[in-house]
Image (cartoon, rainbow, N blue to C red):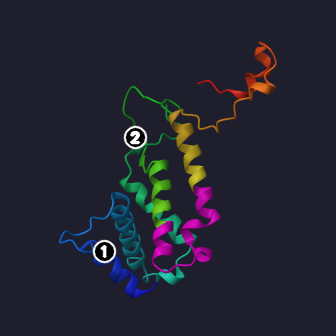
Amino acid sequence: MSSDRGKDLAAEGSSRSPGHDQPITPSRYESQKRRDWNTFNQYLRNQRPAPVPLSQCNSNHVLEFLRYLDQFGKTKVHFQGCMFYGQPDPPAPCTCPLRQAWGSLDALIGRLRAAYEENGGSPETNPFASSAIRVYLREVKECQAKARGVAYKKKQKKPSPSNHKGDDDSSSAGFFTFS
């Protein structure tokens, strides 16, 4: 990572637009990406027994970071033994843990993946783009879907009019998912 690039990012919030006296306000996405990047770098610096340099960061560090973030989550994820497991709207509280929601983690990884490369990291060595991270996110998504009773299924393509044969419902039954 280039230290100059890091300084550029830090100064970006106070930069001025050409010919104007008003500072350029970074977009919400850019601000969040910068905060996420700083948080991840702080996490690496706080590792024990020794800080982890960004150049030595790998997908295992990213996975540990995602698991660390779970303690700050707000999404109730029921254990399989919980009486509310699989219920989208449980009628009472339970002792199951709060976790980071899959969508939040997915968006976070997208921002960190972009920030890594913007800060001099190579796309080939981007730990946020590894298959281990994709597998983890898929497992979180499936686990949370089952625990909350929400099925995540890929939408299937609707049949084209040329393939539709008459009014026989059986010919199109496999193309639609009803919930």
Where is residue 85? Give x, y as percent: 51, 34
Residue at 34 percent across and 66 percent down: it is: 35
Task: Give how far across and how far down residue 49 sits, in percent.
Answer: 43, 82
Disc 2 target residue: 95
Q: What residue type is labelled 2?
A: Thr
Drawn side of residue 146 relative to residue 95, left or right? right
Can residue 88 be seen here?
yes
Quarter of the image for residue 27 reads: bottom left
| Magenta span of residues | 113-136
Query: Could you say which is closer to the camera, residue 9 or residue 106?
Result: 9
Mark 1 highlights which residue? 12
Q: Which residue is drawn at 45% across and 78% down?
A: 119
Which structural element holds mark 1? helix
Q: In this view, does 6 lie above or below 147?
A: below
Task: Name which residue lies at 50% across and 60% down.
Answer: 110
Q: Badge 1, how many Cα within 10 Å: few under 14, some, many 20+?
A: some
Q: Is mark 1 in CB contact (under 8 Å) with mark 2?
A: no
Q: Is residue 162 magenta?
A: no
Q: Main secondary structure of the magenta part?
A: helix
Give the position of the C terminus as an image quadrant.
Answer: top right
Which residue is at the front of the view, 11 or 102? 11
Q: Left or right of 18: which side holds 58?
A: right
Residue 96 occupies quadrant: top left
Disc with the residue nearer the chain's start (1 vs 2):
1
Of residues 32 and 71, the one drawn nearer to the viewer in this rendering:
32
Q: Callout 2: helix, strand or loop?
A: loop
* Foreground label between 1 and 2: 1
